[in-house]
Image (spheres, grey):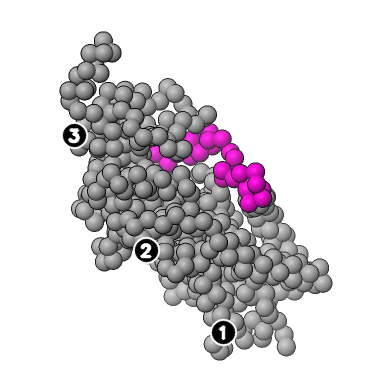
Amino acid sequence: MTRVHRIAQHDVAFDVRGASLLAATCIFLYLRTFLLPAIPLAVQNDAVFFFEHAKRMVDGQVPYRDFFEFVMPGTDIFYAILLRILGVHAWINSCLLILLGVSLCWILIRASKHILTGNGVYLPALLFLIFIFDNARDATHHWYSTLFVLAALLPLFKGRTLSHVFAAGILCGVAICFTQTQGAAGLVAIIVFLILTRRSVTELWKQLALLLLPSAGLVGGMLLFYVHKAGMNSIAYALMEYPRLFTAAQYAYPTNFGGASNDFTGLSRKLSYVLLYVGVPCVYVACLYRLVRVKQVLRASHSDNVLLLTLAGIMLYATIFTGPSYHRLCAVVAPSSVLLIWLCQQGAKRGKLVQHILWGLSLFFFVLGPLRMQLLHRYVLNLPTGRTAVLAPDQYELFRWLGQNTRPGEAFFGYLPAAFALDLRNPTPLDNVLPFQTTTAEQEATVVQSLQKDPARFIFVPKEQPFDDHNRLQLYDSFLNTHYHKLQSFSAGAIWEKVSVENIAIKNGTSQ
């Protein structure tokens, strides 16, 4: 049987192996995001920012006007719809992570069927699940944008008809509505691909029009709505000016391999960090080199599919330079898993050996990961957002203390994971303030003014870090020292409590 027939055969009947892998993916991610029998892990990392924004939108607030946001609002809108329908629950985040992981694996399987043969079709999805997605389980805009960029490639794998190009344009537009850089990167990759594989100039112009018009319509419509609500200046600053400042801050931030420790798990993550930064570009370069070397041997549509996936991978990878971090890196390297196995299948015996090793490692960690998660010591709390598991003992103590001393809807500032878990309200337009470039003097002043108008009883102040800029947040620190006092210390920081008007007068008199 020829390679062409083997690839085409995957689209004929129901794919039992693919369905089995997706079912196993669902089980794997359930055991990584829930503690048995059905206790969700607390929302952590950057996802909590978007859930908090969604809560604000459900309460009638508008991004860019009532609270600060510097990416496209697709994630905020999506989460606001979910919270409006389902309510504010911790399990929503875990279910979204399962949905994201299964969807991405399905797309990778579909893409692999146009490029790979045999059981190798399923290996990229497994590699991606175990070594990439599981290391960055954070339901943020990056993953959604990557999901839609990869989905935009699927119709083009079947051919460059005008209807396929139009579908790709719509999906790229949706991707931009989640993350402007990643969605635009996918769009550029497809444009370059259409130019390189054009049959005629006339057809190329039609394809470009059908690609760009739906994307521009979706993005333009969303931006016009928020320009009307928040004003042009707010939108321009949030989506154009502030991201440049944020990028500069990311490069100034000391690199510590994603905060990995020096134990076995931390060393493994550092190795993963290096491999992703160095190995992924090598895969893309090797694919381009291989395409040039064996283009005459490969079927035209097959080589085009490899080229399209390579271009998409390169453009997605280029977006990490706007803010390098481990989680962002994981969110843009999915195409490399398919291309790595393609390179292995070009390498005869040596390639088969590499595939066998990767299968073995993937299956080993597929079993080890959930087992290790379920055996961890659990700290379970009954919170306003539902019964929730917290893995870190210091975070458990903070959540427990706040749960005993606050009530849902109360104003609180400084620590979003606790604010979401306890359904507390942020009285300021910012998620937090940091003694770093990411918090401007204007934002600092806005936070202080908001806390003066709508005081929070408790404010969480993070523990001082060696890289903090002590010349920043002087206004905020002065406000804290005048109107609040340190009440309770934790390993991650301290809770400050608002003092009465009489005590403020006493403090001012003492300082004089």
- Quadrant of the image containing the C terminus: top left
- Identified by mark 1, the residue type is Asp
Q: CA distance from mark 3 to mark 2?
A: 33 Å
Mark 3 or mark 2: whose residue is earlier in sequence: 2
- Identified by mark 2, the residue type is Ile
- Quadrant of the image containing the N terminus: bottom right
407 sits to left or right of 211: left
| Residues packed near mark 3 inside 10 Å, few (<14), some (14 to 19) or many (20 plus) | few
Residue 157 seen in the current view: no
Q: CA distance from mark 1 to mark 2?
A: 29 Å
Instruction: Give residue 480's position: percent from left, percent from top.
Output: 31, 27
Q: Nearer the viewer, residue 336 or 365?
A: 365
Q: Is residue 163 above or below residue 481?
A: below
Please give the range of residues in magenta.
242-267
Q: Nearer the viewer, residue 324 or 174?
A: 324
Q: Residue at x 44, y 23 (%)?
A: 470
Q: CA distance from mark 3 to mark 1?
A: 60 Å
Nearer to us of marks 3 and 1 is: 3
Residue behind mark 2: 92
Residue behind mark 1: 15
| Residues packed near mark 2 inside 10 Å, few (<14), some (14 to 19) or many (20 plus) | some
Residue 491 seen in the current view: yes
| Number of the label disc, if any, that sits on residue 453 | 3
Residue 46, magenta (yes or no):
no
Residue 255, magenta (yes or no):
yes
| Residues packed near mark 1 inside 10 Å, few (<14), some (14 to 19) or many (20 plus) | few
How many numbered discs?
A: 3
